[in-house]
Amino acid sequence: MDFKDSIKQIGDKIAKQKDNIFTEEATKMAFILPFLQSLGYDIFDTTEVIPEYICDIPTKKGEKIDYAIFKDGQPMILIECKHWAQNLDLHDGQLLRYFTVSKARFGILTNGINYRFYTDLVSPNVMDEKPFFEIKIDDLKEQQIEKLKEFQKSTFNLDDIIQTANELKYTNELRQIIENNVQEPTDDFAKFFAKIVYPSHITSKILEQFKGLVKKTFSQYINDEINERLKSALRKQEQDEKLKISEEAQTNENNEIKPTDEEIEFFLIVKAICRMKVEGKKITYREARGHQYFSVLFEDSQRNPICRFYSIGNKKQVGIFDTEKKAETKIDIISLDDVYKLSEYFLNAIEFYSKSSINSVQ
């Protein structure tokens, strides 16, 4: 099992087991030690993973941290553990005290679900107030898994991780600044853009106007980016399925009337939209060349038409149906890109047929 699979396996276990984990020790055994194992450390070798490692502080002797990971006889990572339901915000001060009296360069505060990684970027041997890296192991992103790999025993390199920590520290702070200003632009943030586009002196009234404009512009930009990525993903899916369906249509000897490339593309667009509600296999098509239309159906039934496509010469239309799926209305379109604008009608049809199917079973 590779690193990615082993980490995700731990995340999958959490939802199933956490309600039966009642103590901090159980949290360590069920969640934290398997995490250290996945990083390649031998949890049974007390020269490598030392439990209850003593970190004496000037005001108190015999203080112990839950685990210390050693390399070449020196501590490199201190790990402070809490019960999985504990709020980590209440416990970072404890790790800070241990970190200060240790030679370790990294500290991890965890409840077995959330992991916060600290180092001493601001002042040597003084743990930074904020973690440079934070994850939820039951909700890991791909780029987080890649960062975690740097902490594996086989690839651990102090200089590389310090460089990564530096980058993450500042990118996290910049991200937070951007997020805050997108939600509620500060005067300085709004003034930065106003100075670029506004040709005259920026008064307080103009500044307030630009704060609203900046917020609105960022919101529009983000929405446009999301829509464009969604559309791009749908196009790729359409292209992949178009190839598959074209090959199937060519080899189907019983299919006397083959759909045109344009009809196949229309079907793939409608199918991609409908997959937001149902499995793709429930969306099918039938050619009705004699009636001059191409039907997209739900569960391969003529009684469940989602829509129809008409193409005569340069004129293209999409037939949609009323709430009872009886009366048809034809809508003119210029190109197949306009089909996306009719998504609501297709999804309403899917919802109607799905409810009808459930009611008939009942």
Image (spheres, rainbow, N blue to C red):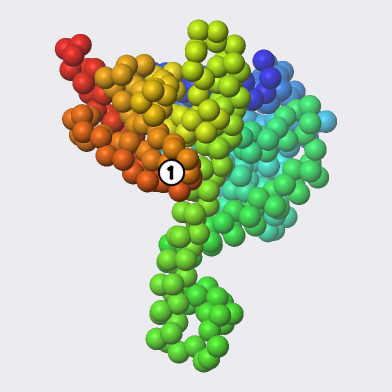
Q: In the rendered image, which quarter is residue 33 located in?
A: top right
Task: Identify the residue shown where x is 59% and y is 11%.
Answer: 251
Instruction: Indicate the position of residue 361 as horizontal and vertical percent values.
Output: 20, 11
Can residue 134 be seen in this snapshot? yes
Instruction: Indicate the position of residue 115 as horizontal and vertical percent values.
Output: 55, 37
Q: Is residue 310 above or below residue 245?
A: below
Q: In the rendered image, which quarter is residue 61 located in?
A: top right
Q: Is residue 217 above or below residue 42?
A: below
The N terminus sits in image quarter: top right
Taking the image as shown, residue 190 lies to the left or right of residue 34, namely left
Instruction: Indicate the position of residue 223 as horizontal and vertical percent values.
Output: 46, 54
Is 268 in front, or is 214? 268
Which residue appears farthest toward the right when viewing the image? Answer: 72
Taking the image as shown, residue 257 lies to the left or right of residue 159, namely left
Which residue appears farthest toward the bottom when viewing the image? Answer: 201
Task: Identify the residue shown where x is 46% and y is 29%.
Answer: 267
Instruction: Indicate the position of residue 163 as horizontal and vertical percent values.
Output: 76, 49
In the picture of the structure, the residue carrying the numbered disc 1 is 315
- Residue type highlighted by circle 1: Lys
Is 270 in front, or is 40? 270
